Amino acid sequence: MDSGTENDDASIASASPPEPQTEPSGPSRRERLRARQKLQAIASSKSEHRHSASSKSRFQMPPVLFGCVLAAALATACLGRWFSRRKLKHKRQDVQRLLTKCKLEPSSAVQQRSPSPPLHSTTFVATAMFQIENLTSEHETQQRGAEHNSGFSSAHAIQEAIHAGATCVGRTNTPEIALGLIDPDHHRSNPAEQDGILGITASSAALVVAQQEADFALTTDHLSGARTSAACCGLYAYRPTRGAISREGVALIAGDLDAVGWICRTPELLPRLGDAFNLPGGKTSKTELAKLILAQDLFGLWGDELTPVCTATLIGCQKWAGDEVAPVSLLVYLRDSVPAAQPLMEADSAEQLMSAFGTAAGLIQQSEYVRCQSEQAGPNTSLQEAGTGIAEVDADSLEAAKQVQTELHRAMHAALSTNNGYLIIPTMPGPPIQRSAPADDLEQFERRTFELSALATLSGVPQVTVPVRMPGHAVTSISILSLHKSDMRLLHLAAKLGPLIAEAAQDVAVALAEEQAEYDEQQQASTTGEGQQSGNASKAEKYKNTANEAFKAGDFDGAITGYSQAIQADPANSVYFSNRAMAYLKVMRFAEAKDDCDSALKLELNVKTLLRRGTSWLGLQEIDSARKDFKHVLSLEPNNRQARQELKALKESEAMFDNQDLHASNGTAEGLL
C-alpha cells in the first residue's frame, strides 16, 4: 500500500510542469488528504483505547437507575440521623425522668487548692434520701418533701464531697423507701444485662452513673441499695464500716442497718473517694501483707453458675498476692461460731445457715423500718405512707435476731483479724435474674441476695462490690470484706484487684470457649464414626503427653481437654483419670476431681490418687472424708510427707477456730462496731 502510493506520487510529479521557485504556498491536496487519513487513524486508535479502559474501570449506569440509587442513599442517611437523634432524645428523657438536676459547685478556694483535692473535676448525684440545699423540682418525690426541704442545708456527706472538689449535678428520683430487690418499672432497662433486674433502692443512681451522667453517686445501703444495684449494672460500690460516714441529713429506713455509701464506674475512683471522706485505715498499713480468703463454698452453694467467676477471681488474686490466697469453707467456720443461728434453721445445712443470717437481718431491718417511719423527718416524709401494713416484730424474735448479729460480728472480726485478712464472696447468687422470670424464681433470687448482703450488714464490716465481666457470659459481681475500720486499705486493694480480676475473666472465658468447641468437635466426631478408634492406646498416650505439657505450662483447661481425649481413647487407664483430677483441682472444680479419683481408684489403688481425693474432699467441705483418705495413705506409706502435713494442718485449723471461739466468748469485742 505504501509502495504503491510512493510510485503514484512519483508519476504525478514527473508528469506535472515544474513548479516556479517562489515562496511555498502550502501542502498539496494529496498531502493534505494523506495527513487527514493519518490523523483519523490515530484518533480512532485513541478512541478505542479510551473506550476499552473506561469499560474496565467503570460501569455506565442508566440515568434512571442512578437516580434511584442516589435517592435510596439519601433516604438511608436521613433515617440514620433521625434514629440517632430519637435514641439520644429518649436517653435524655430517661435521664430527665431519673434525675432532678441542680448544680452545687465547690468554692473557688477549693478549686484553686494546691495540690488538687481528691475529687477535683468530678461530678456526682445523690439519691432522694439526701437533703440538698435549695433544690426545687416538679417531680413527685420532691413535691412530697418540698415543704420540709426549704431552708435545709445539704446532707453532711454531700458537703464533704463538694469540699473535696466534686460538683453535685442532681438528685435521683427512685423509690428509695422500697426494701425489696425486684424493680416493677419495666420502662427502665439494665445497660449491663438485657431485661435483668436493677434493684430498687439505688437503681436510678446506678443507671445515671452507668450512662456517664455523673462519675459517682452517693447512696444509702441496708440489705439492698448500693451493693445490689451496682452488682446488677456492672459497677463498683462501697458500704463503709458502720458509722464511718456521717448520716446527718439523710433519711433512714433501716436505722442502725443503714449506711451511706457510693456507686462508681471505675476502680481508680474508690481510694480517691475514701480520701475525700477521711475514712479510717489509711496509709499506715500495707495491703501487700494481706491474706486473701476466698469463700469457695459460697460460690458453689446454689449451683455451678458462679464457678467460672470463682476461677477468674482466684487467678486474679493470685496474680497480685501469690501464695497469700486461701480458698476456705467459710460456712463450716460460721456454723460453729454462730450457734444462735441454730433456732432459725430448719435443718443443719449450709443453705439453712445462710437462710438464718438472712432471716435475722430481715427481722432487724423490719423492726428498724417500723421505728423509722414514725420518727423520720426530711426529704422523704412519705415513709409513713410506705410503712403502712408492715407489722412490728415481736420481742422474742427480735432478741434472737440480735443475738445472731452479735455472734456473727464476733466471728467475722476473729476471722478477718488473722493475718490482716480480706474475705471474698459473691455479691449475688448469680447474674441479675430476668424480670420476666417466674415469681418464685424472682423471690428466691432476692432472698439469696439478701442472705449474702447480711454478712456485712449484720457484722458492720466494710464491703466493696467489684464487677466481673466475661465475654459470652452475663455480668456478675464479687465482694471484698475487710476488718472494721480498715476501709482505706480495702478501697486500695479493690482498686488493684478489680482490673486483675477483669483480665483473668477474659482469659477464663476464652479457655471455656475453646474447651466447649473441643467438646463439640469430639461429639461430632463420635457421631460420624471418626471416633471409633477409642481403643488405640498409642493415640491415648499422645493425648496424655499433650495434656502433660499443657499442665506444666499452667494451661489447666487445656490439660483437662487433653486428659479427656485420652480417657475417651482408653477408658481403662487409671492414670488418665488421676491426672485429670489434678487438673480439676487447679481450677477448683472439686466435685469433678473427686469423681475422677473415684474412677481411678476403682481401676487401681494408688497413693497419689488418694491424696488428690483427700484434697477434693477438703474443697467440698467434707473434712471427715478428707481425714479418712489421708490416714489411708499413711496406712500404705507411713512416712508419706504430704499426708502427714495435711493431717497436721487439719488439726491446727480446728484448734485455731476453737481458740477464736473462746476468744470471742470472753467478750473481747465490745458491742457492735
Image: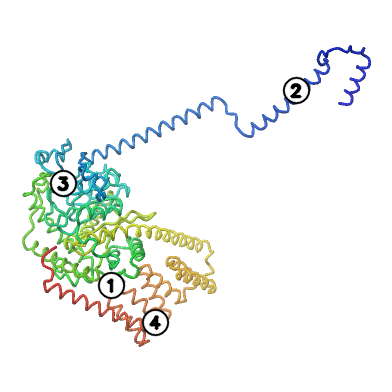
Q: In the rendering, which numbered label is found on residue 592?
A: none
Position in image of residue 265 (x %, y %): 29, 50
Q: Is residue 132 left or right of residue 83?
A: left
The span from disc 2 to disc 4 (Cα, nearest Å) is 101 Å
> What type is the residue that disc 2 sits on?
Gln
2 or 4: tag closer to the N-terminus: 2
> What type is the residue that disc 4 sits on?
Val
Between residue 447 and residue 70, name the one nearer to us: 70
Counting every numbered tag in the picture gives 4
**Residue carrying label 3:** 130
Determine the residue positioned at 28% across, 79% down: 649
Residue 522 in view in this figure: yes
**Residue carrying label 2:** 40
The span from disc 2 to disc 3 (Cα, nearest Å) is 92 Å
Do the residues bearing badges 4 and 1 touch, measured as CB atoms within 8 Å? no
Q: Is residue 220 left or right of residue 520?
A: left
Q: In the rendering, which numbered label is found on residue 621?
A: 1
Do the residues bearing badges 1 and 2 touch, measured as CB atoms within 8 Å? no
2 or 3: tag closer to the N-terminus: 2
Do the residues bearing badges 2 and 4 touch, measured as CB atoms within 8 Å? no
